[in-house]
Image (tube, rainbow, N blue to C red):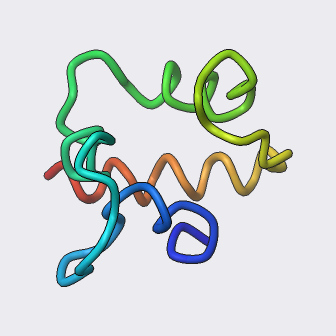
């Protein structure tokens, strides 16, 4: 899911060769004190207030994406 929907802008996996240098990587987001699991889930559930597209993710997809992003911050 992350590679399909997010990798155009974010570096979402080790070894990924492209992504915008203006946008944080998933590793940076996962390590950020700004985003705990709850705040990251809220952000992904309502991205219309940001530059992110509205992906209309289900709760399960949001939970999976949060877990994936946080796993890169370890």
* On screen, residue 61 above or below 36: below
x and y percentages locating residue 53 in the rendered image: 71, 42
Residue, x 24% and y 58% (percent of image)? Answer: 72
Q: Quadrant of residue 43?
A: top right
Would you place residue 30 above or below residue 51 in this image? Answer: below
Q: Is residue 56 above or below residue 35?
A: below
Name the quadrant containing residue 17: bottom left
Q: Residue at x 85, y 45 (%)?
A: 56
Q: Position of residue 30 (x, y in %)?
A: 27, 42
Q: Taking 50 as reference, is 31 left or right?
A: left
Q: Relative to 20, is 51 above or below?
A: above
How many numbered discs?
A: 0
- Between 46 and 59, the one nearer to me in the picture: 46
Q: Position of residue 64 (x, y in %)?
A: 59, 58
* 71 sits left or right of 51 in the view: left
Quarter of image, res 51: top right
User: In which quadrant is the N terminus drawn?
Assistant: bottom right
Residue at x-position 29% and y-position 38%: 29
Horizontal and vertical percent position of residue 32: 21, 28
């Amino acid at each position: 899911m992350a590679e399909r929907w997010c990798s155009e802008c974010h570096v979402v996996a080790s070894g990924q060769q492209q992504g915008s240098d203006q946008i944080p990587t998933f590793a940076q987001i996962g390590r950020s004190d700004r985003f705990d699991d709850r705040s990251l889930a809220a952000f992904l559930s309502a991205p219309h207030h940001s530059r992110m597209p509205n992906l209309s993710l289900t709760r399960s997809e949001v939970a999976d994406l949060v877990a994936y992003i946080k796993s890169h911050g370890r």
